[in-house]
């Protein structure tokens, strides 16, 4: 008998193997949709790492995503450094800015961390508008460098990146760090009294979450060839991330991948409904929330 | 000297409208413990419904507002019955995570309202017609009588609310509910009735303030997130659950924005307010005025 | 149901499904339309395209081949637009993609047009960057066209109107420029500050305000202290609040410029009539701009029940321009089609349409000027949008609101 956690890894491997065959079954267009879903899945996993293992609700994961994406895009446009370096520097900027502006709030209890992250996104949005000559303002930036024109290469890049991120985050989540964080989320006083410096671990989790958010944001920019507020900064993106995590099954790392695919593919499938598709997606989200609070992944983890 | 009076008057008008717009958010958190992230959607919904009935069915202004308030009450009860209550009662959701479930559920609720408004009324903003016409020329400003009326109406609503909560018996029950649910049960008060009253009051409050807000500032489906953001920031600044604190914080934010617009530049209106908010959260996280 | 009736029904269904195909035996020409449905301009883009395609198909299509439209909603998001573009190319094998009024979306689609070697014509986005990209790297971006004059040229339209009308007729002398702080208003404001002095107007102040501003009292108070005759504007994301607050508080300056939301017919109701007296630039209006304009607007109103926003004029023309290019190229081969589009010489509903060549900084934008397309100026008068400029298309004279100084 496998414990649920091992089973979730098996689910992850099954998903990975299934995803390998996507370009051989579907049209280039559908492959493009899956590519976006893979980058989005990394956003959701990063959010889940911080929430699921430290109990902190991050309303501002697009602050990290946005900083990563815009830094990489601005570097690519204004300098001649290679694409890969732009992406790495983007991720570094995401971590640093997060540590300066947001991480201090991790020592606070209650909803204050959530609020600071929310405000950080609103601030970033303002700055993008004000410094329009560098950021393109509400119009956004188109970047000259892209990863590849071939939809297959793009897809496999995204798949490898997503699988790698999932692996790293799973390892962290199941290491002593993850266990301490989980204990602290359930009973902070107890954990503190055992002599663990909870804030230090939280900051570490936040940093890792910021790293992958930033990387994925930068990669997404070089896949789509564009960076804009509605793509990588706006609060609406955060909402989609949180909803995906909860629908997929929070605190599992693999669940968020399911959630991301569920949201993006459902929206695609409902496209003929036009504007109403977003309403239907939200209603489906509410139904899962109420009747399947442990998310889609719990369907596979339940003991027979 | 003119500048001083301009900031004083203009800041007062905008602040009082902000205060009435956010106080409901504080009320429902302070009493029911719900951080309702669909607050902005409530305001915009009642504003757009009021506007629609006034401009398309030619209802008188106040009758249109009544329809808006009714819509707001309906949405308020729906939210409670369909989402808040089931999550509260659910055995599947661990108690420690109920907060995040309610946050997510109200966010989804907000998106549903927002997209439906967008679908039926387009995303362009609307303005509820002015209650009175005419202009007062004061200190080289053009102040409309409508702004003055809106400002007074807002203050009046705030006073009525404050009196209701602090001076009436029913209000005291609400206040007690916010402190201890068990205590209420012991004193023999039916908690269900308290909730019905509470969400009703919340509906009326958001309904009225939505129409007032939209008579000066306008409303559109797209302004939902920024209104929720405003309510959230103001209420945290004033101390979560502290109604008086939120009203004071609304004035603080209103005046900071007005001063920024007059003294620095109208391009940066909202930035200083956000920066101050971050600083306060870092150094005085319980808000400026604490709780109660 | 008797067997006979069943057979009759089946025949009827088959006839319904296949007859149109028999009439148009030839393979259809697929065109993708990407628009922001639910917005006034976006809906006009879709409707304009439908109307043009229906008219062309009713006359036998393009050399016997009917046009088939594939319509995608991008929800005003660049990601959705890029996905729609990919779908149009990969799944629906379109000859060209037309649409979107948001510069952010158009700039995001531009690299994809280049990568997928597919023609993209924006019929609503105004940023001159779109055509600068084509000019700077023609071989890569030759697939992109802008069938709408850009923000710099929009400012020129406003200046020309001020010179011809407000300065000559009313002797106005001073102006204050106030635009929303957005990327598209940067070239616009730069051109205002350059062309207003040339018309004899003195610019007494310039201000850019945050696009999320809702209380305009500080802004109007500041403007009023400079005592200008005119307030020259660049408003698209904003527009309603300041229009209403200007009207309610009776600020004594005339508002003229770009107030994109005010150039559509439902703005009267949204503003409860506060828009009376507002003057705004637009690409088209129900006025004799060319002989084709009024018949187009009448037909559009008959089919869709409202008058078109600017995207309707431009997109209607774009489909005709595209159809003619396919006819001339005698093929749907992309490179041949680009050559044919570059040779466009067509009288549309918004004016005489020709594209600038690759040596122009506005490569693949449409030519601007009196003999091409100039745009129109509209004013709200007694609840109706009247055309007040250019003189040959004007349906009314400018009326100065009672509280504005004359």
Image (cartoon, coloured by chain):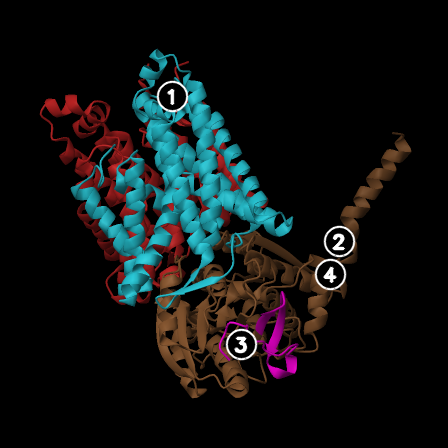
Chain colours: A red, B cyan, C brown
Q: Chain of mark 3?
A: C
Which residue is label 4 attached to?
C302
- Foreground residue, B188 or A47? B188
Using the rendered image of the protein, determine whether residue B66 is visible from the camera's viewpoint: yes
Q: Are marks 4 and 1 in contact (CB under 8 Å)?
A: no
The label on residue C366 is: 3
The label on residue A301 is: 1
Q: Residues within 10 Å of mark 4 (few under 14, many from 20)?
A: few
Q: Are marks 2 and 3 in contact (CB under 8 Å)?
A: no
Disc 2/disc 3 C-alpha distance (Å): 36 Å
Which residue is label 2 attached to?
C21
Q: Indicate the position of residue A58 as horizontal and vertical percent values.
A: 29, 39
Q: Are marks 3 and 1 in contact (CB under 8 Å)?
A: no
SS category of the residue bearing label 4? helix
Disc 3/disc 4 C-alpha distance (Å): 29 Å
Disc 4/disc 1 C-alpha distance (Å): 59 Å
State whether discs 1 and 2 lie on one chain: no
- Foreground residue, A292 or C344? A292
Q: Are marks 2 and 4 in contact (CB under 8 Å)?
A: no
Q: Chain of mark 4?
A: C
Q: Residues within 10 Å of mark 2 (few under 14, many from 20)?
A: some
Which numbered disc, 2 or 4, marks the residue closer to the eye?
Answer: 4
The quadrant of the rendering that contains the N terminus of chain B is bottom left
A90, above or below A53, in the image: below
Q: Are marks 3 and 4 in contact (CB under 8 Å)?
A: no
B247, above or below C202, in the image: above
Q: Which residues are magenta?
A: C378-406
Q: Residue at x 28, y 30 (%)?
A: A52
Using the rendered image of the protein, determine whether residue C78 is visible from the camera's viewpoint: no
Which numbered disc, 4 or 1, marks the residue closer to the eye?
Answer: 4
């Amino acid at each position: 008998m496998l414990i649920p956690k091992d089973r979730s890894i098996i689910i992850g491997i099954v998903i990975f193997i299934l995803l390998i065959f996507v370009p051989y079954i579907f049209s280039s267009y559908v492959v493009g949709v899956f590519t976006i879903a893979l980058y989005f899945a990394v956003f959701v996993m990063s959010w889940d790492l911080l929430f699921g293992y430290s109990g902190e609700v991050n309303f501002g994961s697009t602050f990290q995503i946005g900083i990563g994406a815009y830094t990489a895009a601005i570097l690519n446009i204004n300098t001649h450094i290679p694409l890969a370096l732009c992406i790495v520097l983007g991720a570094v900027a995401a971590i640093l800015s997060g540590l300066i502006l947001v991480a201090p709030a991790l020592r606070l209890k209650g909803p204050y961390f959530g609020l600071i992250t929310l405000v950080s996104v609103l601030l970033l949005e303002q700055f993008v508008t004000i410094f329009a000559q560098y950021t393109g303002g509400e119009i956004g930036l188109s970047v000259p460098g892209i990863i590849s024109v071939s939809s297959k290469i793009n897809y496999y890049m995204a798949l490898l990146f997503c699988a790698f991120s999932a692996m790293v985050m799973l390892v962290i989540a199941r290491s002593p760090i993850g266990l301490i964080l989980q204990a602290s989320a359930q009973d902070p006083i107890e954990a503190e009294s055992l002599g663990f410096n909870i804030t230090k671990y939280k900051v570490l989790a936040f940093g890792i979450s910021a790293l992958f958010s930033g990387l994925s944001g930068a990669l997404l920019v070089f896949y789509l060839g564009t960076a804009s507020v509605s793509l990588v900064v706006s609060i609406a993106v955060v909402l989609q991330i949180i909803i995906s995590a909860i629908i997929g099954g929070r605190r599992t790392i693999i669940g968020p991948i399911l959630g991301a695919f569920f949201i993006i593919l459902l929206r695609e499938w409902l496209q003929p409904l036009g504007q109403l598709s977003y309403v239907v997606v939200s209603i489906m989200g509410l139904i899962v929330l109420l009747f399947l609070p442990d998310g889609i992944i719990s369907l596979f983890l339940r003991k027979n | 000297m003119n500048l001083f009076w301009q900031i004083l008057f203009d800041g007062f008008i905008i602040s009082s409208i902000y205060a009435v717009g956010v106080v409901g958010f504080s009320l429902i958190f302070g009493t029911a413990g719900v951080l309702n992230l669909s607050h902005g959607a409530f305001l915009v919904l009642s504003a757009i419904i009021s506007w629609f009935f006034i401009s398309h069915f030619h209802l008188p202004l106040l009758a249109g507002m009544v329809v808006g308030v009714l819509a707001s009450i309906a949405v308020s009860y729906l939210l409670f019955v369909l989402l808040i209550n089931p999550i509260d009662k659910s055995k599947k959701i661990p108690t420690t995570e109920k907060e995040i479930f309610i946050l997510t559920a109200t966010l989804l609720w907000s998106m549903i309202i927002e997209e439906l408004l967008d679908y039926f009324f387009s995303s362009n903003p609307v303005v509820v017609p002015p209650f009175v016409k005419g202009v007062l020329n004061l200190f080289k400003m053009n102040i409309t009588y409508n702004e003055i009326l809106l400002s007074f109406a807002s203050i009046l609503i705030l006073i009525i609310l404050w009196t209701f909560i602090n001076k009436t018996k029913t209000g005291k029950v609400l206040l007690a509910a916010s402190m201890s649910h068990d205590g209420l049960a012991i004193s023999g008060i039916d908690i269900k009735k308290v909730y019905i009253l509470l969400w009703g009051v919340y509906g009326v409050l958001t309904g009225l303030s939505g129409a007032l807000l939209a008579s000066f500032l306008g409303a559109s489906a797209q302004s939902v997130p920024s209104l929720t953001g405003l309510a959230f920031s103001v209420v945290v600044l004033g101390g979560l659950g502290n109604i008086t604190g939120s009203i004071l914080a609304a004035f603080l934010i209103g005046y900071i924005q007005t001063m920024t617009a007059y003294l620095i530049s109208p391009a940066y209106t909202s930035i200083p307010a956000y920066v101050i908010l971050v600083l306060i959260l870092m150094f005085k996280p319980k808000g400026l005025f604490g709780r109660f | 149901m008797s067997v006979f009736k069943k057979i009759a029904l089946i025949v009827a269904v088959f006839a319904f499904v296949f007859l149109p195909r028999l009439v148009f035996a030839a393979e259809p020409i697929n065109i993708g339309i990407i628009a922001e449905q639910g917005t006034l301009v976006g809906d006009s883009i879709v409707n304009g395209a439908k109307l043009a395609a229906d008219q062309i198909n009713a006359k036998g299509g393009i050399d016997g081949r009917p046009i088939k439209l594939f319509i995608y909603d991008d929800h005003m998001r660049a990601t959705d637009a890029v996905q729609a573009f990919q779908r149009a190319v990969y799944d629906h094998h379109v000859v060209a993609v037309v649409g979107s009024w948001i510069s952010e979306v158009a700039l995001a689609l531009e690299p994809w047009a280049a990568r997928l070697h597919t023609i993209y014509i924006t019929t609503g986005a105004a940023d001159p960057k779109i055509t600068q990209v084509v000019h700077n790297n023609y071989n890569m971006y030759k697939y992109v066209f802008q069938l709408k004059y850009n923000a710099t040229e929009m400012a020129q339209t406003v200046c020309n109107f001020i010179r011809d009308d407000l300065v000559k007729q009313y002797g106005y002398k001073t102006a204050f420029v106030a635009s929303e702080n957005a990327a598209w208003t940067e070239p616009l404001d730069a051109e205002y500050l350059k062309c207003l002095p040339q018309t004899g107007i003195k610019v007494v102040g310039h201000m850019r305000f945050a696009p999320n501003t809702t209380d305009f009292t500080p802004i109007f108070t500041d403007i009023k202290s400079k005592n200008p005759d005119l307030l020259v504007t660049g408003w698209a994301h904003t527009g309603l609040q300041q229009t209403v607050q200007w009207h309610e508080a009776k600020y004594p300056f005339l508002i003229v410029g770009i107030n994109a939301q005010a150039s559509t017919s439902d703005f009267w109701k949204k503003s409860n009539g506060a828009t009376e007296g507002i003057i705004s630039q637009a690409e088209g209006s129900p006025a004799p701009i060319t002989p084709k304009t009024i018949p187009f607007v009448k037909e559009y109103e008959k089919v869709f029940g409202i008058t078109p926003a600017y995207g309707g004029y431009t997109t209607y023309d774009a489909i005709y321009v595209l159809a003619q290019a396919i006819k001339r190229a005698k093929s749907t081969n992309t490179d041949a089609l680009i050559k044919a589009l570059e040779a466009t010489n067509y009288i549309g509903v918004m004016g005489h349409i020709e594209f600038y060549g690759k040596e122009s900084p506005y490569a693949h934008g449409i030519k601007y000027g009196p003999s091409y397309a100039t745009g129109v100026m509209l004013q709200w008068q007694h609840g109706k949008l009247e055309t007040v400029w250019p003189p040959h298309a004007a349906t009314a004279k400018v009326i100065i609101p009672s509280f504005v100084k004359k």
